[in-house]
Each structure stands twice: as C-alpha cells, then as structure tokens.
C-alpha cells in the first residue's frame, strides 16, 4: 500500500533531470537571488578528455626498458636558447606558472620561490608585479608582461631571468581579470597604483599593441631594453593552438606557453572558465605541429599547462611533444590549499575542502590566497617551500619511472608512439591509437 | 654632442651605447640621425642624458624611459613612451596611438596631435598635447594628468580611476564613468605648472577638468549596462 495513495496505485520514483541537475538549479537560484554572475577561482571543473585517457604501453620484446636506480634518465631542459644570450637552464621540466601577488599572499609567493629553487626550476610572477620576497627566493624568475601592466617597471624587467608576454590564459581565453576590493590591501593598492578597496580590473588585451605584427615589434622592444640577454616567452590560451603557436614563433618568441582550460585563474566568471577554451589534451598536438611545420620543434620550447597533477601527466605532455610543463593549481594544493584540516572553516564558508574556489574573496582558511594578516600568518613559507619541493621531486621521479619503462634515457625522448588512448575522443585529440587498435580518428591515410 | 647615424650603426649598437651611460656620464648630449621610422629607438634609457632624434620614429620610441630627455624632431609611431617612469619626451610632430601607455611618471609633450588611446592605462605620467587627441584616450587611466589644448575624441577617460583630464576645446563624448569636474584653484595651479613645464602658452582658465565619477569602482549589477 502506498501511503500517499489510498487506492494503492504505484508512484514513479522521483527522478532528477539530467538537464536541470541540482548543480544547475543551484546556479539558477543563486543568479536569481543576486543578479550577478558567479565569479570564482580555479580552472574548468567539468569533466573533459584529459591525460587520464592516455596510457603508456611500456617496454616489450621490441622495446627494452632502462633499469630504475641504475640507468640514468635525464630531466633537464634549456628554454630560450634561440635568441637569448642567457637561456634558462632547468633541472626538471616542471615550472611554476604565473600567479600574482595580490591573488596570493607575499609568503605564498615566497614559498613558491623556495620550493621551485630547491627543485631546480623556475617560478613566475603574475598580475601585480615582482615582489622582493619572490625575487629573493627564486633562483630563476620569469617576469610576466601582462595587459594590465600593474607593477610593471623596467628595473624589475631587468632583474628577470626570462620575460613571459601574456596574451591569454586557459581559464579565460579573451578575458581579463578582477581582483575584488577586499583583497586590495595597502600594499597591493600601492603596487598597482589604485585606490584601496576598489574592484580592480585587469585588462583583457595589451594597451599598446594588437595583432601578430605588433607583437613582433613588442618583442623587439623588450629585447632591446633587456639587451637580448633573457628569453622571451609568449603565453597563449588553448584557443587556436596551431595558429597562435605559429604566430608567436613568427613574432620571435623563444618559448610558447600554452595553457588549457583546466588551467586556473585567480578569479573570473564561472561561465567563462567552463565554456571558453579547449582541454589541455586537445591543444598540444596542434601546437607541436605548428612548431614542426616551421622547423622549430625543440628550438622554440613548448611549455604546456592546465591541469598537470602528476609525473604521469608530465610524461604524457612530453611524449606528445612538449618540452616542459607548468603547474599552478597543483602547486597551491602542495602548499596546503584546500587541505581537509581546515574543513570546519570551509564548511563555515559554505563549501568543503577540495571545492573551495572563492579565492578572490580573500578568506582562504589555508592563508594562501588572501591578504588578511591573520589568515596569512597561518602559512609558513619555509614549510610551504619544502612541501612544494617534495611534490616537484615526486612528479619528476614518477615521470622518470615511466620514461625508463619506455626505454628512454631522457624525458624528451618520450614520443607519441609510447602512448595509446582509452577513448575515441582522446585518440583523436592526442593522435595516438585507440588501445587495442592501430587507428585513431583522423589518422592520415585511413577511411572510416 | 655624440652623433649616431642609425643607418650605419644599427639599432642594437645604438641602444647599447645609450644604455651604457651611467648616472654620472659626461656624455649627456646625443643626436640620432637617419631614424627612418625605426622601432624601439632609445627605449629603456636610464641616465640623465638628452637624446635628440632627427626625424620620425616607429613603435615604442623611448619606451620605459627613466631619467632621460628624448626629443623627436618628427612624428612618433605607436606606443611612444610606453610605460615611461620618469624623464621627458618631446614630440615636435604628431604622435600615433597608445602614446604614453601605462606610463608611471615623467612628462610627454606633443606639439602636434595625438591619435587614439593616448594615455591608455596611464599610471602617473603627465601628458600635454598642444593639438587634439583621438578616441578612447586615457582608457582605464589610473593616475597622472592628461592635458589637451585642442579637442578630445570619443569616449574620453572611459572606465578611468584617479587620472585627471584637462581639455581646452571640445570633448566629442565622455567614456563610461567619466564626468566633468569642478576646476578648483589647486587644479588651476597644477595645470599652469604642467603647461609651463611643457613650454606651452595657454590660459588654465580656458580648460575644463574631467575625471572619474567613481560609480564603477565596485561592481554593481545595476551598472552593468554602463560597461
């Protein structure tokens, strides 16, 4: 007997809509209540084809492996040797992506410098300029040249080991940024030359150039100002990777930084993060193709970012042709961001560890994405640096483990031939065979 | 006076010579001939020297200038004096777009007209234009002063912060959140000093001041239509 129906007619099970999910409904209710789109940090949270959809085949009768702990597997990479007098020499091909002082606290930036330096790699400034603690603790520091030019000055430019002209980022190709008033502390306001407490916009395009021909002249100017000493990278979002890479190379870039949609941002519209850009897996092959078509593969370095988490991701990126990777979100997690030990405080903010992404609000319980002195005091930059170094070392060891299993004595010797894909989508994007076949969608010479 | 013929010396060698000058250099006067519109001439200077360029220049002449005085005896290409920190740039002819973009300090004087986006994202630089300026000038201007003795084009000061604009002629239209302001005595004094420094004879009383209405400083959905 159905207690709700005296006649005993069976009810259907309450059914949730696949279109109007609880998540979507909560978005609609939030929009209806506030009248403002949702702003958040981080990268795309939706499930997209990723490096998880690829597998290495490892050694077999036709491929023999290298002995772990005995036979060397090199990890070093040189970036920017094409035009720069002093290219960047890294011990490991995992760099720290640009994250701003302002979005991050000073001690968090210091920890990134400490960890990267201890692991033999570079870190990168962000929108907001170069801080002394970051420069002081980073053996190799890449200076981002951004549309907003906040904190931009030639003295810092000359202190940099490389310059990264930021055209776009994976989380928001074609979008600018927003640092809400609560994070504009006195120090942030002074560095950015803005009144304290206002919502600060970061421009979406550079104020003094448009298009690839101008970019070539901008690169010339930056080289002249820095005496042709340091490499110049161009960072683009994973929008049109073949053409963007081609144009960056033709404009004279020493390295191309390519950022997929899983790459994080300090703050932008959720709709932008989730609906603009391409997955990291989808952008690497077109970019490598562009490099190969111009005869520049391995001469102009490709640094891939956007959702890199493990040594397996590093190895897969390199097998597909990248020279190095950059990590941002993963580095913050290594520092302690979204750690379950702050669960009660995440709950108080209406969220949970792992899901916290309102970095722009400046209330980060982990004390990393904040300018609040009390919260910042929770974060120890020395300990944070040690944790980041450990994490980078583990990623490197993992990548080496895979490379040795594939018989490679350098991570750069990994190749697409080492990979298979688990899904049709990943096979098409990575241009490696679907597991169990010798075919991928779009393979030249095949019909389907 | 040191004279460099750019057609013979080349850009790299010329900039290298200028960059080699220290604060206490005794070679303070430089002349560059045959610039022929080359890009990045005299960019990144950081010494109390005076460089006179005999002819027109391309993109980013005197970009990121510190301390130096750069005189352009011709017209100047896009992005001239971008991110200037200090010193002075004087353009005898016209200036192309993005003049003094993101400039943090110093003074830029244009004897002719300046094109669109003059003073875009200015962060403390002072710009004095004897003629007219184009559209979208001082877009997102943060601080500093833009003085226009002629007319201003469309959307002056769009989305500006604390930069001040003084225009003697007409303004075709004001950008989002830019409004006409009261000209108080301290502004007249400031304007007079800027005109004096630029060597331009004009009466501050003939100018109108514009600046941010500060309505867009904190995001409000009711203002979304203004963007």
Image (spheres, coloured by chain):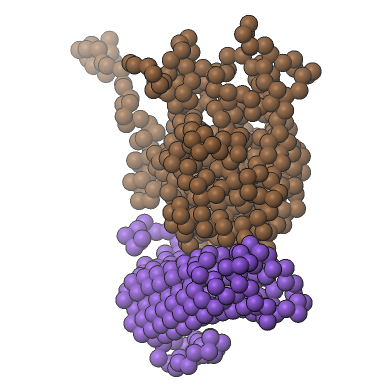
Chain colours: A brown, B purple
Asked if one can make out residue B106 in the rendered structure from this viewpoint, the answer is no
Report x, y in % for residue B155: 35, 70
Residue B57 is left or right of residue B227, and the answer is right
- Quadrant position of residue A428: top left
Placement of B27 over or under A199, stated as above or below: below
Q: Please, which residue is most extreme toward the top here?
A: A61
B224 relative to A137 in the view: left or right = left
The residue furthest left is A7
Tell which of A114 and B35 is nearer to you. B35
Residue shown at the point (49%, 54%) measured from the top left: A215
- The reply to whether residue B53 is visible in this rendering is yes
Image quadrant where residue B40 sits? bottom right
Towards the viewer: A250 or A96: A250
Residue at 57% x, 75% y is B33
- Vertical comparison of A414 with B4: above or below: above
Quarter of the image containing the C terminus of chain A? top left
Question: Residue B3, how many percent across, how many down?
Answer: 65, 77
Residue at image point 43% right, 54% down:
A211
């Amino acid at each position: 007997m159905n207690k709700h129906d005296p006649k005993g007619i069976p009810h259907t099970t309450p059914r949730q809509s696949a279109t109007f999910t609880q998540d979507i409904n909560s978005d609609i209710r939030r929009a209806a209540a506030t009248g403002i789109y949702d702003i958040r940090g981080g990268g795309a949270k939706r499930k997209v084809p990723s490096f998880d959809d690829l597998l290495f085949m490892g050694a077999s009768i036709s491929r023999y492996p290298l002995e772990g702990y005995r036979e060397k597997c090199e990890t070093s990479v040189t970036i920017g040797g094409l035009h720069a007098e002093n290219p960047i020499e890294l011990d490991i091909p995992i760099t720290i992506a640009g994250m701003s002082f302002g979005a991050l606290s000073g001690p968090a930036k210091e920890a990134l410098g400490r960890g990267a330096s201890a692991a033999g790699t570079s870190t990168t400034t962000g929108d907001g300029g170069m801080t002394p603690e970051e420069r002081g603790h980073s053996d190799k520091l890449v200076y981002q040249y951004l549309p907003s030019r906040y904190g931009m000055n030639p003295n810092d430019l000359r202190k940099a080991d490389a310059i990264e002209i930021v055209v776009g980022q994976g989380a928001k190709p074609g979008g600018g940024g927003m640092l809400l008033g609560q994070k504009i502390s006195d120090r942030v306001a002074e560095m950015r030359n803005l009144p304290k407490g206002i919502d600060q916009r970061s421009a979406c395009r550079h104020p003094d150039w448009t298009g690839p021909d101008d970019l070539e002249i901008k690169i010339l100017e930056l080289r002249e100002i820095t005496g042709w000493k340091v490499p110049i990278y161009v960072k683009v979002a994973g929008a049109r990777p073949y053409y963007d890479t081609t144009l960056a190379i033709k404009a004279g870039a020493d390295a191309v930084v390519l950022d997929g949609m899983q790459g994080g941002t300090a703050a932008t519209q959720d709709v932008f993060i989730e609906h603009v850009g391409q997955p990291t897996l989808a952008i690497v092959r077109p970019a490598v193709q562009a490099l190969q078509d111009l005869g520049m593969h391995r001469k102009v370095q490709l640094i891939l970012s956007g959702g890199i988490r493990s040594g397996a991701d590093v190895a897969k990126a390199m097998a597909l042709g990248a020279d190095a990777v950059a990590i941002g979100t993963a580095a913050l997690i290594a520092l302690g961001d979204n750690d379950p030990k702050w669960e009660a405080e995440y709950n108080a903010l209406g969220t949970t560890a792992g899901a916290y992404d309102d970095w722009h609000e400046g209330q980060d319980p982990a004390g990393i994405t904040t300018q609040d002195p009390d919260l910042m005091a929770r974060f120890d930059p020395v300990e944070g640096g040690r944790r980041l170094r450990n994490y980078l070392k583990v990623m490197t060891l993992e990548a080496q483990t895979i490379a040795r299993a594939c018989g490679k004595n350098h991570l750069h010797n990994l190749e697409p031939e080492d990979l298979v894909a688990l899904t049709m989508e990943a096979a098409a994007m990575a241009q490696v065979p679907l597991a169990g076949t010798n075919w991928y969608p779009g393979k030249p010479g095949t019909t389907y | 006076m040191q004279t460099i013929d750019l057609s013979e010396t080349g850009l790299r060698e010329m900039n290298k010579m200028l960059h080699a000058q220290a604060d206490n250099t005794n070679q303070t006067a430089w002349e560059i001939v045959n610039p022929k519109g080359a890009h990045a001439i005299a960019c990144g200077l950081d010494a109390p020297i005076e460089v006179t360029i005999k002819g027109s220049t391309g993109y980013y002449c005197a970009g990121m200038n510190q301390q130096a005085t750069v005189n352009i005896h011709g017209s100047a290409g896009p992005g001239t004096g971008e991110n200037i920190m200090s010193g002075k740039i004087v353009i005898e002819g016209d200036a192309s777009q993005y003049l003094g973009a993101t400039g943090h300090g110093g003074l830029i004087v244009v004897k002719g007209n300046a094109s669109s986006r003059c003073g875009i994202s200015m962060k403390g630089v002072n710009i004095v234009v004897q003629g007219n300026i184009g559209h979208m000038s001082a877009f997102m201007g943060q601080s500093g002063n833009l003085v226009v003795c002629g007319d201003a084009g469309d959307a002056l000061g769009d989305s500006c912060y604390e930069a001040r604009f003084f225009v003697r002629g007409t303004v075709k239209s004001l950008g989002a959140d830019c409004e006409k302001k009261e000209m108080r005595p301290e502004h007249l004094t400031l304007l007079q000093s800027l005109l004096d420094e630029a060597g331009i004879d004009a009466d501050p009383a003939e100018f109108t001041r514009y600046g941010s209405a500060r309505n867009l400083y904190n995001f409000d959905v009711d203002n979304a239509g203004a963007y």
